[in-house]
Image (cartoon, coloured by chain):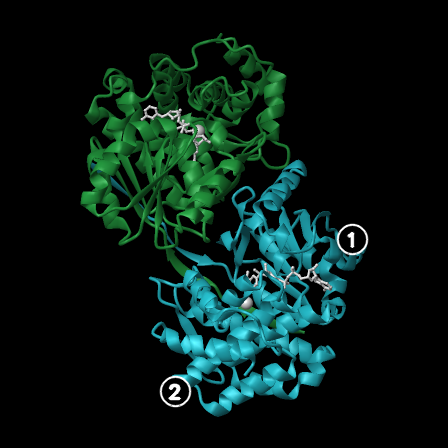
Chain colours: A cyan, B green
């Protein structure tokens, strides 16, 4: 018997910058050309973001010495599939892309996840730059390196941790975003505040008007704060060993509602219902003060999130929550707030309590 | 403008052991059960390796407390495809595999690459254990973490670096291996000796009989030496930034021949022709002494490798070599031997010389 040790202990530096700015799109070509010397840029986008943002990029590309190829896919979650992934790989191959080139993800979280996964696998990994254009992707999905596509009925089941080379966020892109998508992103914004930053929560309470009218200063501050919060969490736990779970606040029940709704609700709407329910659970367990619960309720109300009753069976939601891949050993794990800006993790919540709280939350009682 | 730094500088330890042993299969279940506590094992194999090795594994699995699911695919390079990858992902999903479970690649390099890539992507990464059963996979593909599937006409274009948790090599599996596959692996064995180990080259000169009759001591020594050589190279260059290119000796021309032959030749046969040609180039450039060239010729002759003339157009091979993704900027990069056990990297070889050497090599003149 012979035993050979392969020693692969190494220092890896996958650090990167996130730039948040109003009007950044105007100098996107320049930012990119400085990043990867000589490489070509495969711009992955959907038809919507192609129309909105690609012409300006191409206009300026030549001057910036940037060579672009546009790879567009239909908008919508259905494009986050292995079939579309395969199509993109084929196009990169036909264009003879090599590891000296890179991928730009220009769009919402769907585009970011799809483009990031494609980049991560093509020739064992091209760099990807994330240029998120929805609020959800700016405050959440573009940061942290989680990329994926879906299997039928199994969201994000095929993917990687593939950190971006850079994240370039132009909050002005939000001007064209449908209001419902904006609100969906705001739910994640509120989540960030509840789990990590009481001062930011206050800002959201006072800045509602400014945010909803897309006041640039308010939006830059909001997006930058969320990115900093998420970055801090990801730094401690790049591969979801533990601390990163705190980002799941509102998501245990939120995901179950998302499944049950068959995606008739946006992700953020579901998370908003999830936060309402999970905060109540925390309160019932004596973890989360009444006054903080009321503040969260008011904030969600103020942003118009999770206002309507939902016609769903609590029992089914509990089943779906059990099935969640993020849970271990059959117990439902919850991230529960203990104050505005603080959380704890619990997997001992009595199912009766969950049921009771779900009934009240769904009925908006 | 706000700039947020995501600091992901970290110590990563992806080290692992390679165990080389005659009869290791007999205690495979036990080895595996010790590796991942409580996890289930998805055994990826092809129909051939399923028949040969899975019954013994399953027989012993229960006693070892190991729960196995067998995921088999048709043998042959055609299974290294996105379609088969998708099928495997679906099966893992149907079986409700999670990140606590792991994948065993039980077969040749095709299975190792396919299973490794599938493991690397499913739920953003399950551990994979490599149990290679061909000589080629034991001395080459199972070590180093390169995993991939093919795009149509583009070998290994979709993949990852996904280091195995462990490599378990039973040289006794080679007893059922068709002689042609054995020879294919021996070409890579000879390559390892030429690029890195003059003493090992001598052993191959003297141990021909023992090796070809699969004398267990000789085979264990051979496989272990090759693994140690490859491990040493991979340790210095996990992601192919530079030093790892030395493994491409014989492959610049070998890959071109493989493409031109439409896979009628085995990989090792093509590499053997490639080594013959590239050693001649090195000799013509005054880099590689005549006597060493003759020794390599004799060794390849002795193992019955690359003996027949090939009816191929040198010009076409040069074109194919240019197209090789491993080359930069249109020039052909060669790894050339400077002595038995030593190489240098050159991208200034005159095309006329390549043409001339190819003509002689193809004619076996
Ligand atoms: N990787 C992660 O960590 C992570 C985290 C959260 C969510 N996600 C993923 O993100 C996806 C959801 O992201 P999303 O909400 O951005 O969805 P999305 O990318 O599908 O975008 C929503 C819609 O907005 C359109 N759009 C995008 N930018 C626009 C703009 N500036 N103006 C007008 N329309 C625009 C899109 O074309 C699309 O129709 C899901 O697939 C989810 O799984 C990933
Ligand atoms: N990842 C890497 O670093 C790397 C390096 C070199 C080659 N490769 C890949 O490896 C693959 C080639 O590997 P391969 O030559 O092992 O091919 P293979 O896996 O296709 O096996 C060759 C044949 O031998 C059969 N077989 C396997 N084990 C057997 C046994 N013990 N007894 C009898 N039959 C057996 C298989 O069923 C198959 O028909 C290619 O896809 C190549 O790209 C990868
Ligand atoms: Zn979310
Ligand atoms: Zn090879």
Q: Is residue A7 visible?
A: yes
In which chain is the residue bearing label 2? Answer: A
Q: Is residue B20 visible?
A: no
Q: Which residue is mark 1?
A: A58
Q: Is residue A93 above or below residue A183?
A: above
- SS at badge 1: helix
On the image, which quarter does residue B358 sit in? Answer: top right
To the question of a shared chain for discs 2 and 1, the answer is yes
- Residue situated in front as seen by the camera: B191 or B26: B26
Tell me if the residue at label 2 has its CB under 8 Å from ligand 3. no
* Camera-side mark, 2 or 1: 2
Q: Which comes before the other along the chain, label 2 or label 1? A: 1
Per the rendering, the mark at residue A286 is 2
**Percent position (x, y) of residue B34?**
23, 49
Q: Is residue A189 above or below residue A51?
A: below
- Residue situated in front as seen by the camera: B114 or B329: B114
- SS at badge 2: loop
**Percent position (x, y) of residue A242?**
39, 67
Q: Residue at x 55, y 71 (%)?
A: A271
How dense is the environment of label 1, judged by Cα within 10 Å: few (below 14), some, or many (20 and up)?
Answer: some
Q: Is residue B311 above or below residue A248?
A: above
Q: Residue at x 29, y 27 (%)?
A: B52
Real-space Cα distance between discs 2 and 1? 56 Å
Q: Quadrant of the N terminus of chain A?
A: top left
Q: Residue at x 42, y 16 (%)?
A: B290
On the image, which quarter does residue A272 sit in? Answer: bottom right
**Percent position (x, y) of residue B145?**
41, 43
Q: Quadrant of the C terminus of chain A?
A: bottom right
C-beta proximity under 8 Å, tags 2 and 1: no
């Amino acid at each position: 018997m012979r035993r050979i040790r392969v020693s692969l202990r190494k220092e890896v530096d996958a650090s990167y910058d996130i730039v948040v700015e109003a009007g950044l799109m105007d100098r996107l070509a320049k930012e990119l050309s400085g990043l990867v010397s000589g490489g070509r840029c495969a711009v992955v986008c959907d038809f919507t973001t192609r129309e909105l943002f690609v012409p300006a990029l191409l206009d300026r590309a030549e001057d910036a010495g940037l060579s672009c190829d546009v790879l567009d896919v239909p908008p919508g979650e259905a494009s986050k599939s292995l079939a579309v992934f395969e199509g993109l790989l084929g196009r990169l191959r036909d264009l003879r892309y090599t590891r000296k080139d890179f991928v730009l993800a220009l769009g919402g979280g769907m585009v970011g996840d799809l483009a990031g996964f494609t980049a991560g696998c093509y020739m064992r990994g091209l760099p990807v730059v994330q240029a998120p254009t929805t609020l959800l992707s700016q405050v959440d999905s573009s940061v942290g390196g989680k990329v994926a596509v879906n299997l039928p009925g199994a969201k994000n089941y095929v993917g990687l941790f593939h950190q971006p080379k850079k994240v370039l966020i132009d909050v002005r892109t939000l001007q064209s975003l449908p209001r419902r998508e904006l609100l969906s992103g705001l739910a994640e914004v509120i989540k960030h505040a509840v789990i990590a930053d009481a001062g930011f929560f206050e800002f959201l309470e006072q800045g509602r008007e400014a945010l909803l009218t897309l006041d640039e200063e308010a939006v830059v501050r909001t997006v930058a704060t969320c990115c900093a919060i998420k970055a801090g969490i990801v730094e401690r736990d790049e591969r979801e060993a533990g601390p990163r779970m705190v980002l799941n606040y509102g998501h245990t029940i939120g995901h179950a509602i998302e499944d049950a709704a068959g995606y008739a609700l946006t992700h953020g709407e579901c998370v908003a219902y999830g936060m309402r329910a999970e905060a109540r659970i925390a309160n019932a367990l004596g973890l989360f003060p009444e006054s903080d619960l009321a503040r969260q309720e008011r904030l969600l109300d103020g942003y118009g999130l999770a206002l309507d009753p939902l016609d769903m069976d609590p029992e089914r939601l509990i089943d779906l929550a059990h099935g969640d891949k993020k849970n271990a050993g059959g117990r439902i794990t919850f991230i529960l707030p203990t104050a505005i800006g603080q959380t704890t993790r619990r997997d001992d919540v009595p199912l009766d309590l969950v049921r009771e709280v779900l009934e009240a939350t769904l009925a908006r009682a």
